[in-house]
């Protein structure tokens, strides 16, 4: 698989999130998927955990959109730089909805098994998000 073909895996993953269709999101991940996010106390594991995570995210940011700005490929592992945009209409990190729009940058470290995501570790600055939402 060429680097360009591999990069489309990451773009497809973020495109699925941008549809807000949870079944489409789940179709991008292995059943034993493992995910670490700065807003969760524990890793998100498997489709049940991912379904709950997606439901909360889409409730909190119903207009959530990711824009992938760069993808670096190293075999089955990829790193994606992205820009998130969304309006906080639900609770975020146990803080009330503000109705404010926010945008921030983050990085996903993704490991694929074929075309499906097996492991994903996400990095972004939650303190900055809380500040931009007026919640800090």
Image (cartoon, helix red, strand yellow):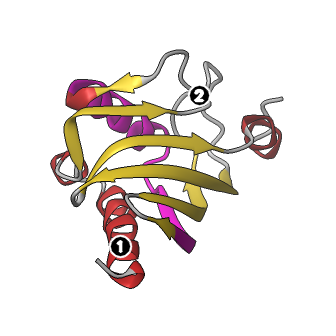
Q: Secondary structure at mark 1?
A: helix
- Of labels 2 and 1, earlier in sequence is 1
Q: Secondary structure at mark 2?
A: loop
Left or right: 129, with 4 as reference point: right
Q: Residue at x 41, y 79 (%)?
A: 3
Position of 90 relative to 116 (above/below):
above
The stretch of residues the image draws in magenta is 48-72
Image quadrant assignment for residue 37: top right
Residue sitting nearer the eye, 31 or 17: 31
Tag in front: 2 or 1:
1
* Numbered badge on residue 80: none
Q: Is residue 56 magenta?
A: yes
Answer whether residue 102 is visible to the viewer in this image.
yes
How many numbered discs, if any? 2
Residue beneath label 2, please?
Answer: 39
> Taking the image as drawn, is residue 103 in sight?
no
Read off the residue under disc 1.
6
Mark 2 and mark 1 in contact? Answer it, CB < 8 Å: no
Instruction: State the CA–CA distance, disc 2 to disc 1.
Output: 28 Å
Above or below, 60 relative to 48:
below
At x 59%, y 64%, the residue is: 82
Location of residue 88 (image quadrant): top right
Name which residue lies at 30% across and 54% down. Answer: 20
51 sits to left or right of 17:
left
Q: Residues within 10 Å of mark 2 (few under 14, many from 20)?
A: some
């Amino acid at each position: 698989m060429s680097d360009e073909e591999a990069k489309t895996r990451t773009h497809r993953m973020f495109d699925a999130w941008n549809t807000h269709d949870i079944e489409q999101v789940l179709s991008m991940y292995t059943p034993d998927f493992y995910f670490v996010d700065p807003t969760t106390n524990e890793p998100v594991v498997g489709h049940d955990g991912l379904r709950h995570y997606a439901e909360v995210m889409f409730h909190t940011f119903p207009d959530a959109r990711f824009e992938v700005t760069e993808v670096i490929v190293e075999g089955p592992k990829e790193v994606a730089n992205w820009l998130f945009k969304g309006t906080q209409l639900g609770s975020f990190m146990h803080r009330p909805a503000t109705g404010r729009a926010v945008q921030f940058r983050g990085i996903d470290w993704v490991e694929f098994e074929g075309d499906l995501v097996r492991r994903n570790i996400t990095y972004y600055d939650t303190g900055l998000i809380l500040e931009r939402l007026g919640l800090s």
